[in-house]
Amino acid sequence: MKFFKKKQNHEISVQTAISKKKTHPFDIIDNYDPLSKFKINLYSTIKEAIPVIDAAISKLVRLIGTFKIECEDKDVEFEINKFLQNVKVGSCSTGIDSFIFVHLNQLLTYGTAIGEIIPNSKFNDIAALYNASLRNISLKSDNGSLNLKIYKKLSNGELKEIKYPELIAISVLNPDPESLYGNSILKGLPFVSGILLKIFASIGNNWERVGNARFAVTYSPPKDASEQMYTKERAENIASEWSKAMKSETPTDFIAIGDVDIKVIGADNQVLDSKTPVRQILEQIVSKLSIPPFLLGLSWSTTESMSVQQLEILNSELESYRRILNPVINKICNMWMQFKRLDLNFEIKWCSINLKDELRLANTRLLKAKAREIELKNESKEN
Protein backbone atom coordinates (compact mmCIF):
# COMPACT_ATOMS: atom_id res chain seq x y z
CA MET A 1 0.00 0.00 0.00
CA LYS A 2 1.28 3.43 -0.95
CA PHE A 3 0.91 5.90 1.89
CA PHE A 4 1.93 8.86 -0.20
CA LYS A 5 -0.20 8.85 -3.28
CA LYS A 6 0.72 11.17 -6.07
CA LYS A 7 -1.71 14.04 -6.27
CA GLN A 8 -3.72 13.90 -9.48
CA ASN A 9 -3.49 16.89 -11.77
CA HIS A 10 -6.97 17.99 -12.79
CA GLU A 11 -5.78 20.94 -14.88
CA ILE A 12 -6.99 20.89 -18.48
CA SER A 13 -4.79 22.41 -21.16
CA VAL A 14 -6.63 24.73 -23.53
CA GLN A 15 -5.37 25.66 -26.97
CA THR A 16 -6.78 28.60 -28.87
CA ALA A 17 -7.40 28.41 -32.59
CA ILE A 18 -8.23 30.98 -35.22
CA SER A 19 -11.94 31.10 -35.76
CA LYS A 20 -13.10 30.51 -39.33
CA LYS A 21 -16.62 31.70 -38.71
CA LYS A 22 -18.02 34.05 -41.33
CA THR A 23 -18.23 37.61 -40.07
CA HIS A 24 -21.02 38.40 -42.55
CA PRO A 25 -22.92 36.46 -45.24
CA PHE A 26 -21.25 38.24 -48.17
CA ASP A 27 -17.96 36.34 -47.98
CA ILE A 28 -17.14 37.01 -51.65
CA ILE A 29 -16.21 40.58 -50.65
CA ASP A 30 -13.59 39.33 -48.18
CA ASN A 31 -12.16 36.84 -50.70
CA TYR A 32 -11.85 39.15 -53.69
CA ASP A 33 -8.60 39.57 -55.60
CA PRO A 34 -7.57 43.24 -55.79
CA LEU A 35 -5.67 42.61 -59.04
CA SER A 36 -8.57 41.01 -60.87
CA LYS A 37 -10.05 43.01 -63.75
CA PHE A 38 -13.61 41.87 -64.23
CA LYS A 39 -15.76 40.73 -61.34
CA ILE A 40 -19.49 40.65 -62.05
CA ASN A 41 -20.51 38.70 -58.95
CA LEU A 42 -18.35 40.88 -56.70
CA TYR A 43 -19.92 44.18 -57.76
CA SER A 44 -23.42 42.70 -57.69
CA THR A 45 -22.80 41.52 -54.13
CA ILE A 46 -21.52 44.94 -53.05
CA LYS A 47 -24.72 46.59 -54.30
CA GLU A 48 -26.82 44.04 -52.43
CA ALA A 49 -24.77 44.22 -49.23
CA ILE A 50 -24.41 48.03 -48.96
CA PRO A 51 -27.80 49.72 -49.54
CA VAL A 52 -26.27 53.20 -49.76
CA ILE A 53 -24.24 52.12 -52.81
CA ASP A 54 -27.32 50.73 -54.55
CA ALA A 55 -29.22 53.92 -53.71
CA ALA A 56 -26.42 56.11 -55.08
CA ILE A 57 -26.26 54.26 -58.41
CA SER A 58 -30.05 54.33 -58.73
CA LYS A 59 -30.09 58.10 -58.11
CA LEU A 60 -27.34 58.69 -60.69
CA VAL A 61 -29.37 56.73 -63.23
CA ARG A 62 -32.54 58.72 -62.53
CA LEU A 63 -30.70 62.06 -62.52
CA ILE A 64 -29.29 61.44 -66.00
CA GLY A 65 -32.63 62.66 -67.30
CA THR A 66 -34.32 62.18 -70.65
CA PHE A 67 -33.65 63.40 -74.17
CA LYS A 68 -35.29 63.98 -77.54
CA ILE A 69 -34.07 64.03 -81.10
CA GLU A 70 -34.04 67.23 -83.13
CA CYS A 71 -33.93 66.84 -86.88
CA GLU A 72 -33.93 69.25 -89.82
CA ASP A 73 -37.06 67.57 -91.16
CA LYS A 74 -39.83 68.06 -88.58
CA ASP A 75 -41.88 65.16 -89.92
CA VAL A 76 -38.94 62.80 -89.50
CA GLU A 77 -38.26 64.32 -86.09
CA PHE A 78 -41.82 63.50 -85.02
CA GLU A 79 -41.55 59.93 -86.34
CA ILE A 80 -38.21 59.13 -84.74
CA ASN A 81 -39.25 60.51 -81.35
CA LYS A 82 -42.47 58.52 -81.59
CA PHE A 83 -40.44 55.43 -82.34
CA LEU A 84 -38.12 56.04 -79.35
CA GLN A 85 -41.08 56.50 -77.02
CA ASN A 86 -42.81 53.28 -78.09
CA VAL A 87 -39.97 50.91 -78.97
CA LYS A 88 -40.14 47.60 -77.13
CA VAL A 89 -37.35 47.02 -74.59
CA GLY A 90 -36.80 43.46 -73.42
CA SER A 91 -39.93 41.54 -72.59
CA CYS A 92 -41.77 43.92 -70.29
CA SER A 93 -40.61 47.51 -70.89
CA THR A 94 -41.29 50.15 -73.50
CA GLY A 95 -39.42 53.29 -74.50
CA ILE A 96 -35.81 54.26 -75.02
CA ASP A 97 -35.61 55.61 -71.46
CA SER A 98 -36.03 52.11 -70.03
CA PHE A 99 -33.22 50.85 -72.24
CA ILE A 100 -30.88 53.74 -71.39
CA PHE A 101 -31.53 53.49 -67.64
CA VAL A 102 -30.68 49.78 -67.55
CA HIS A 103 -27.71 50.36 -69.85
CA LEU A 104 -26.34 53.11 -67.57
CA ASN A 105 -26.95 51.05 -64.44
CA GLN A 106 -24.95 48.21 -65.96
CA LEU A 107 -22.25 50.63 -67.08
CA LEU A 108 -21.80 52.19 -63.63
CA THR A 109 -21.90 48.87 -61.81
CA TYR A 110 -19.61 46.80 -64.03
CA GLY A 111 -17.79 49.39 -66.13
CA THR A 112 -19.11 47.83 -69.34
CA ALA A 113 -22.62 47.76 -70.81
CA ILE A 114 -23.87 45.93 -73.89
CA GLY A 115 -27.11 46.55 -75.74
CA GLU A 116 -28.55 44.88 -78.80
CA ILE A 117 -30.72 46.23 -81.62
CA ILE A 118 -33.18 43.53 -82.66
CA PRO A 119 -34.60 43.94 -86.20
CA ASN A 120 -37.94 42.51 -87.28
CA SER A 121 -38.31 39.37 -89.35
CA LYS A 122 -38.20 41.30 -92.63
CA PHE A 123 -35.07 43.14 -91.53
CA ASN A 124 -36.56 46.51 -92.50
CA ASP A 125 -37.28 48.02 -89.07
CA ILE A 126 -36.22 47.87 -85.42
CA ALA A 127 -38.47 45.48 -83.50
CA ALA A 128 -36.98 45.88 -80.01
CA LEU A 129 -33.97 46.84 -77.92
CA TYR A 130 -32.33 44.39 -75.57
CA ASN A 131 -29.91 44.80 -72.63
CA ALA A 132 -27.53 41.85 -72.78
CA SER A 133 -25.96 40.30 -69.71
CA LEU A 134 -22.18 40.53 -69.47
CA ARG A 135 -22.11 36.92 -68.31
CA ASN A 136 -23.16 35.81 -71.79
CA ILE A 137 -20.81 38.04 -73.80
CA SER A 138 -17.06 37.95 -74.35
CA LEU A 139 -15.02 40.70 -76.05
CA LYS A 140 -11.80 39.94 -77.89
CA SER A 141 -9.50 41.60 -80.41
CA ASP A 142 -6.63 40.47 -82.59
CA ASN A 143 -3.10 41.17 -81.44
CA GLY A 144 -2.26 44.74 -82.31
CA SER A 145 -5.57 45.21 -84.11
CA LEU A 146 -8.37 47.65 -83.41
CA ASN A 147 -11.01 45.25 -84.70
CA LEU A 148 -13.34 44.21 -81.90
CA LYS A 149 -14.84 40.74 -82.00
CA ILE A 150 -17.92 39.94 -79.96
CA TYR A 151 -18.59 36.38 -78.86
CA LYS A 152 -21.67 34.85 -77.30
CA LYS A 153 -21.20 32.19 -74.64
CA LEU A 154 -23.16 29.04 -75.39
CA SER A 155 -24.65 26.71 -72.79
CA ASN A 156 -21.81 24.21 -73.30
CA GLY A 157 -19.21 26.88 -72.55
CA GLU A 158 -18.10 27.45 -76.14
CA LEU A 159 -17.81 30.89 -77.71
CA LYS A 160 -19.63 31.76 -80.91
CA GLU A 161 -18.90 34.98 -82.79
CA ILE A 162 -21.82 37.37 -83.22
CA LYS A 163 -23.11 37.33 -86.80
CA TYR A 164 -24.16 41.00 -86.96
CA PRO A 165 -21.81 43.05 -84.72
CA GLU A 166 -23.22 46.27 -86.21
CA LEU A 167 -26.38 45.61 -84.19
CA ILE A 168 -24.46 45.61 -80.89
CA ALA A 169 -23.97 48.82 -78.88
CA ILE A 170 -21.15 48.75 -76.34
CA SER A 171 -20.25 51.38 -73.72
CA VAL A 172 -17.18 51.34 -71.48
CA LEU A 173 -16.38 53.53 -68.47
CA ASN A 174 -12.80 54.71 -67.88
CA PRO A 175 -11.10 51.76 -69.60
CA ASP A 176 -7.45 50.95 -68.91
CA PRO A 177 -4.96 51.13 -71.79
CA GLU A 178 -5.20 48.08 -74.09
CA SER A 179 -8.28 46.88 -72.19
CA LEU A 180 -11.58 46.06 -73.88
CA TYR A 181 -13.58 46.39 -70.66
CA GLY A 182 -14.21 49.48 -68.59
CA ASN A 183 -13.82 50.06 -64.86
CA SER A 184 -16.74 50.09 -62.48
CA ILE A 185 -17.29 53.11 -60.24
CA LEU A 186 -17.25 50.52 -57.43
CA LYS A 187 -13.62 49.70 -58.13
CA GLY A 188 -11.67 50.24 -54.92
CA LEU A 189 -14.70 49.81 -52.66
CA PRO A 190 -14.59 46.05 -51.85
CA PHE A 191 -12.01 46.58 -49.09
CA VAL A 192 -13.85 49.37 -47.26
CA SER A 193 -17.19 47.61 -47.90
CA GLY A 194 -15.85 44.49 -46.19
CA ILE A 195 -14.86 46.53 -43.13
CA LEU A 196 -18.28 48.16 -43.03
CA LEU A 197 -20.02 44.78 -43.20
CA LYS A 198 -17.86 43.46 -40.36
CA ILE A 199 -18.89 46.41 -38.20
CA PHE A 200 -22.59 45.92 -38.99
CA ALA A 201 -22.36 42.17 -38.37
CA SER A 202 -20.61 42.76 -35.03
CA ILE A 203 -23.28 45.25 -34.01
CA GLY A 204 -25.95 42.70 -34.86
CA ASN A 205 -24.22 39.99 -32.83
CA ASN A 206 -23.79 42.30 -29.84
CA TRP A 207 -27.47 43.27 -29.88
CA GLU A 208 -28.44 39.64 -30.20
CA ARG A 209 -26.44 38.88 -27.06
CA VAL A 210 -27.96 41.85 -25.25
CA GLY A 211 -31.47 40.93 -26.28
CA ASN A 212 -30.95 37.27 -25.37
CA ALA A 213 -28.66 37.50 -22.36
CA ARG A 214 -26.53 34.57 -21.18
CA PHE A 215 -25.94 34.08 -17.46
CA ALA A 216 -23.03 32.65 -15.50
CA VAL A 217 -24.23 30.94 -12.30
CA THR A 218 -21.38 30.26 -9.88
CA TYR A 219 -21.86 28.19 -6.72
CA SER A 220 -19.15 28.46 -4.05
CA PRO A 221 -19.39 25.53 -1.63
CA PRO A 222 -18.78 26.14 2.09
CA LYS A 223 -15.44 25.29 3.65
CA ASP A 224 -16.97 22.75 6.01
CA ALA A 225 -15.79 19.25 5.02
CA SER A 226 -19.16 17.70 5.85
CA GLU A 227 -20.92 20.14 3.53
CA GLN A 228 -18.45 19.65 0.70
CA MET A 229 -19.64 16.06 0.34
CA TYR A 230 -22.87 17.35 -1.20
CA THR A 231 -21.29 19.93 -3.53
CA LYS A 232 -21.97 17.99 -6.72
CA GLU A 233 -25.62 17.28 -5.82
CA ARG A 234 -26.27 20.88 -4.86
CA ALA A 235 -24.63 22.18 -8.06
CA GLU A 236 -26.81 19.87 -10.16
CA ASN A 237 -29.89 20.94 -8.22
CA ILE A 238 -29.04 24.64 -8.73
CA ALA A 239 -28.49 24.05 -12.46
CA SER A 240 -31.80 22.21 -12.77
CA GLU A 241 -33.79 24.88 -10.93
CA TRP A 242 -32.10 27.67 -12.85
CA SER A 243 -32.94 25.98 -16.13
CA LYS A 244 -36.58 25.67 -15.11
CA ALA A 245 -36.71 29.33 -14.12
CA MET A 246 -35.26 30.43 -17.46
CA LYS A 247 -37.62 28.24 -19.51
CA SER A 248 -40.70 29.40 -17.64
CA GLU A 249 -42.99 31.72 -19.63
CA THR A 250 -44.01 33.59 -16.47
CA PRO A 251 -41.71 35.39 -14.00
CA THR A 252 -40.31 32.79 -11.60
CA ASP A 253 -38.26 33.26 -8.46
CA PHE A 254 -35.01 31.37 -8.10
CA ILE A 255 -34.11 30.28 -4.56
CA ALA A 256 -30.79 28.66 -3.71
CA ILE A 257 -28.94 27.75 -0.53
CA GLY A 258 -25.33 28.80 -0.11
CA ASP A 259 -23.11 31.27 -1.85
CA VAL A 260 -24.52 31.60 -5.38
CA ASP A 261 -23.33 34.36 -7.72
CA ILE A 262 -25.24 35.20 -10.92
CA LYS A 263 -23.78 37.49 -13.59
CA VAL A 264 -24.70 38.36 -17.15
CA ILE A 265 -22.03 37.15 -19.56
CA GLY A 266 -20.42 40.07 -21.35
CA ALA A 267 -22.20 42.73 -19.30
CA ASP A 268 -18.89 44.24 -18.20
CA ASN A 269 -17.51 44.53 -21.72
CA GLN A 270 -17.36 47.97 -23.28
CA VAL A 271 -19.31 48.33 -26.53
CA LEU A 272 -17.12 49.93 -29.21
CA ASP A 273 -18.29 53.21 -30.68
CA SER A 274 -19.06 52.57 -34.36
CA LYS A 275 -20.17 56.08 -35.31
CA THR A 276 -16.73 57.41 -36.25
CA PRO A 277 -15.42 54.44 -38.29
CA VAL A 278 -18.74 54.00 -40.08
CA ARG A 279 -18.77 57.67 -41.10
CA GLN A 280 -15.17 57.48 -42.30
CA ILE A 281 -16.03 54.50 -44.49
CA LEU A 282 -19.18 56.15 -45.81
CA GLU A 283 -17.13 59.23 -46.70
CA GLN A 284 -14.86 57.03 -48.81
CA ILE A 285 -17.88 55.48 -50.54
CA VAL A 286 -19.60 58.81 -51.20
CA SER A 287 -16.42 60.39 -52.56
CA LYS A 288 -15.94 57.45 -54.94
CA LEU A 289 -19.52 57.68 -56.21
CA SER A 290 -19.32 61.50 -56.62
CA ILE A 291 -22.76 62.13 -55.22
CA PRO A 292 -23.61 64.69 -52.50
CA PRO A 293 -24.25 62.98 -49.15
CA PHE A 294 -27.51 64.82 -48.51
CA LEU A 295 -29.01 63.12 -51.59
CA LEU A 296 -28.48 59.81 -49.81
CA GLY A 297 -30.09 60.93 -46.55
CA LEU A 298 -26.75 61.44 -44.76
CA SER A 299 -27.17 64.49 -42.53
CA TRP A 300 -23.57 65.61 -42.34
CA SER A 301 -22.72 69.17 -41.43
CA THR A 302 -22.33 71.28 -44.56
CA THR A 303 -22.74 74.83 -45.74
CA GLU A 304 -24.84 76.22 -48.55
CA SER A 305 -21.80 77.09 -50.65
CA MET A 306 -20.43 73.58 -50.16
CA SER A 307 -23.75 72.09 -51.26
CA VAL A 308 -23.67 74.22 -54.42
CA GLN A 309 -20.14 73.02 -55.19
CA GLN A 310 -21.19 69.41 -54.66
CA LEU A 311 -24.11 69.87 -57.06
CA GLU A 312 -21.78 71.36 -59.66
CA ILE A 313 -19.49 68.34 -59.35
CA LEU A 314 -22.48 66.04 -59.70
CA ASN A 315 -23.62 67.94 -62.81
CA SER A 316 -20.20 67.48 -64.40
CA GLU A 317 -20.35 63.74 -63.65
CA LEU A 318 -23.80 63.45 -65.20
CA GLU A 319 -22.64 65.35 -68.27
CA SER A 320 -19.76 62.91 -68.72
CA TYR A 321 -22.16 59.96 -68.47
CA ARG A 322 -24.36 61.58 -71.10
CA ARG A 323 -21.38 61.86 -73.45
CA ILE A 324 -20.73 58.14 -73.01
CA LEU A 325 -24.37 57.32 -73.78
CA ASN A 326 -24.56 59.54 -76.88
CA PRO A 327 -22.83 57.01 -79.22
CA VAL A 328 -25.34 54.33 -78.20
CA ILE A 329 -28.29 56.63 -78.93
CA ASN A 330 -26.68 57.70 -82.22
CA LYS A 331 -26.26 54.09 -83.26
CA ILE A 332 -29.92 53.31 -82.58
CA CYS A 333 -31.13 56.41 -84.45
CA ASN A 334 -28.77 55.80 -87.38
CA MET A 335 -29.99 52.22 -87.65
CA TRP A 336 -33.58 53.45 -87.69
CA MET A 337 -32.65 55.96 -90.41
CA GLN A 338 -31.03 53.23 -92.49
CA PHE A 339 -34.08 50.99 -92.22
CA LYS A 340 -36.25 53.94 -93.31
CA ARG A 341 -33.74 54.77 -96.09
CA LEU A 342 -33.20 58.27 -94.76
CA ASP A 343 -30.03 60.32 -94.68
CA LEU A 344 -30.67 63.29 -92.43
CA ASN A 345 -28.68 65.05 -89.76
CA PHE A 346 -30.05 64.93 -86.24
CA GLU A 347 -28.98 66.06 -82.80
CA ILE A 348 -29.54 64.67 -79.30
CA LYS A 349 -31.02 67.25 -76.94
CA TRP A 350 -30.87 66.27 -73.27
CA CYS A 351 -33.21 67.88 -70.79
CA SER A 352 -31.84 70.15 -68.10
CA ILE A 353 -30.47 68.25 -65.13
CA ASN A 354 -32.34 70.37 -62.59
CA LEU A 355 -34.39 73.54 -62.29
CA LYS A 356 -31.51 75.29 -60.60
CA ASP A 357 -29.57 75.35 -63.86
CA GLU A 358 -32.61 76.71 -65.70
CA LEU A 359 -32.91 79.52 -63.13
CA ARG A 360 -29.24 80.39 -63.50
CA LEU A 361 -29.50 80.45 -67.29
CA ALA A 362 -32.61 82.64 -67.11
CA ASN A 363 -30.91 85.07 -64.73
CA THR A 364 -27.85 85.17 -66.98
CA ARG A 365 -29.95 85.98 -70.05
CA LEU A 366 -31.81 88.66 -68.06
CA LEU A 367 -28.58 90.33 -66.92
CA LYS A 368 -27.20 90.24 -70.47
CA ALA A 369 -30.40 91.80 -71.82
CA LYS A 370 -30.27 94.57 -69.20
CA ALA A 371 -26.60 95.21 -69.94
CA ARG A 372 -27.34 95.39 -73.66
CA GLU A 373 -30.23 97.78 -73.02
CA ILE A 374 -27.99 100.11 -71.01
CA GLU A 375 -25.34 100.00 -73.75
CA LEU A 376 -27.90 100.98 -76.41
CA LYS A 377 -29.15 103.88 -74.28
CA ASN A 378 -25.62 105.16 -73.80
CA GLU A 379 -24.93 104.88 -77.51
CA SER A 380 -28.13 106.83 -78.32
CA LYS A 381 -27.17 109.59 -75.89
CA GLU A 382 -23.73 109.92 -77.41
CA ASN A 383 -25.16 110.22 -80.89
Image: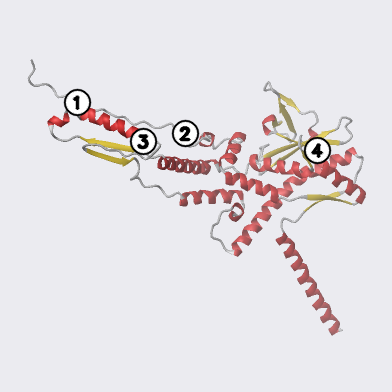
SS category of the residue bearing label 1: loop
Give me the residue at 76% from left, 45% from top: 97
Quickly name the residue at label 3.
246
Quickly name the residue at label 2.
22
Please name whichever residue, 354 or 171, is drawn nearer the observer in this view of the structure.
354
- Expressed as whole percent of the image width and height from the top left, the position of residue 246 reads 36, 36
Q: Amino acid at mark 3?
A: Met
Q: Tell me how far mark 4 sits from mark 1, CA to CA.
A: 81 Å
Q: Amino acid at mark 4?
A: Lys
Tell me if residue 315 comes above or below residue 201 in the rendering.
below
Q: Tell me how far mark 2 sits from mark 4, CA to CA.
A: 44 Å
Q: Are marks 2 and 4 in contact (CB under 8 Å)?
A: no
Give me the residue at 36% from left, 31% from top: 17
In the image: residue 11, left or right of residue 347: left
Q: Tell me how far mark 1 sits from mark 2, CA to CA.
A: 37 Å
Quickly name the residue at label 1.
9
Between disc 3 and disc 1, the foreground one is 3
